[in-house]
Amino acid sequence: MKTIFVIFDSLNRTALAPYGGDATLTPNFARFADRAVTFDKHYVGSLPCMPARRDMHTGRLNMMHRPWGPLEPFDNSYAQMLSTAGVYTHMVTDHYHYFEPGGAGYAQAFDSWSFKRGQEYDPVTVRVAPDVAALREGYDPRHYPLDRLPEGTLTHRSTDPLAYRRMQHALNAEHMTDEADYPLAQCFASAFEFLDGNKDADDWLLQLECFDPHEPFMAADRFRDGDDSRPVLDWPPYERLANSPEEIDSIRGNYRALLRMCDDYFGQLLDWMDATGAWQDTCLIVTTDHGYLLGEHEWWGKNKMPCYEEIAHIPLMVWHPDHADQAGTRRGGVTQTMDIMPTLLELNGVPVPGEVQARSLLPHLANPDAPAEDRTVVFGLFGGPMGVTDGSYSYVHYPTSTATDALNMYTMAPQHMTESFSPEELGQAGMVPPLGFTKGARLMRVPVAREVKEAGFAAAADSAAGSAVYDLRVDPGQTTPIEAPGTTARLQRALAETFARHEAPPELFHYYGLDDVLSETAAPKRSAG
């Protein structure tokens, strides 16, 4: 099987025409939906970027055992498994987090990969000690980051890392004088190089993974709304909404512009499929890792707030040449990010490992009349509020304990997002027995570090309303919690059962107040070590 797997980062479902968005904004996503099977209740799992990708690679939820981190030595990655089975795997990406310490192993799981530089603060233009004032002189004065930078010189060891990152973004933007310089354009050019060179071969997977439309929302001029001379507000902080209506409109407008650019380049891929006849023998999948709040619920971004529908409910569309008769149809069963792993394996006749908790999407493709599975899924960030949904109701479950010191990370890959675990952290580590999915390997149990707490527990600390249930059938925007004790108990039990299936440590049950939710026979028996 030939497979093209396209991931756009932070692709909002409701912004796409197939999901009710402006048809003039994303005509090519609509064009693909006319041919593909569209999934209406597809949800995230672990968040954000790297945790979501570990879910994808392994068919299991990452968030019960650690936050952001690499592939573990014992993980079964679909890229590695396909390669072992004779399927060539190649990734094209501009997602620079793959090449930080906390992203180790994902790109290397593929037979080959191509990395395009310059997204966000990934340095494609290097200045050791740039002077902000001098940078302003030669830079487009509309651009947002420079308006917010302090005077003087910024270095990579600045006491204000956010300011340095914005400065690096500004330097990168100087490099992008032509549309072809944009990382998105470079990704698609590299993908077409692979496709043109291998269209006559069989048994390959191309993963085309684009950082856009992730912030900063910087699109080529032809995708912007007319002759817009306003400041380019393109990088909102992950904070409460505190902007003027004009600023909100500008930020949303820049997201729309970048979404147009993504749609245009995705359309070029569809053109290639048309021109080469690849629809006859090539599977095409498009999805995202998570959504993004653009002012809904009075928030920007993700991570610090509950995983509202705008973040958790994501697009998924699949074309399979063996099911061409299903073109333009939709599926209403609940599916999840981790389902990608067994799907890619089964597409290529590779057995799914026993520890996988995900479900293949292939049965959904074959039969539109099959009743939707009775499935409840769980999603969230390590240590933050958990989301639970059955597709009809959504439940936000906050931690009930403030004893975050009791939480631990379980790993054999001691890396944070941008650095290794410190000697102090490793000095507190202990070894615990293997889990069912670690292939006999014991694990380090490492107390949660201060900086991880600050990132992972921000949502719990910022809770204004606490745990709540929403009826998505009448309130998809989650504006009005309902009183539904029976539904709350059912979804809370589903959360505890998901923890148990994934062998979550006992302290996690206590942290979320789930100690007594499961029966004695179903409760986890493993010692914390």
Image: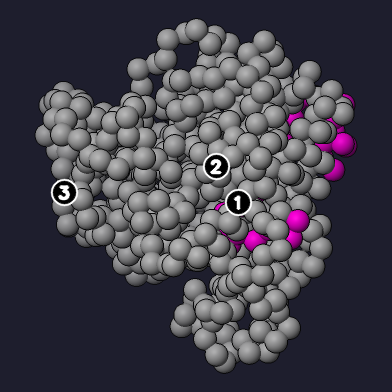
Q: Which contiguous range is marked in magenta?
A: 193-222
Please name the residue shown 49% across and 76% down the image.
161
Label 1, label 2: how many angstroms apart (C-alpha)?
8 Å
Task: Give percent across and percent down for residue 331.
Answer: 50, 19
Residue that badge 1 annotates = 256
Residue 229's mark?
none
Residue 400's mark?
3
Label 2, label 3: how many angstroms apart (C-alpha)?
35 Å
Residue 15's mark?
2
For the residue pair 34 and 437, the one nearer the viewer reads as 34
Please name the residue shown 76% across and 56% down the image.
222
For the residue pair 195 and 269, the one nearer the viewer reads as 269
Kind of residue sitting beneath label 1: Arg
Task: Give percent across and percent down for residue 155.
Answer: 58, 84
Q: Regarding mark 1 in the picture, which secondary structure is present there?
A: helix
Kind of residue sitting beneath label 3: Thr
For the residue pair 104 and 309, the one nearer the viewer reads as 309
Do residues under tags 1 and 2 come within 8 Å of each other at their CB atoms? yes
Task: Give percent across and percent down for residue 158.
Answer: 51, 83
Kind of residue sitting beneath label 2: Ala
Task: Give percent across and percent down for residue 521.
Answer: 16, 23
Q: Residues within 10 Å of mark 3 (few under 14, many from 20)?
A: some
Please identify the quarter of the rendering in which residue 438 is found: top left
Label 3, label 1: how many angstroms apart (C-alpha)?
39 Å
Mark found first going from the N terminus, 2 or 3: 2
Label 2 vs label 3, nearer the camera? 2
Please name the residue shown 36% across and 22% down the image.
375
Q: Can residue 135 be seen in this view?
A: yes
Mark found first going from the N terminus, 1 or 2: 2
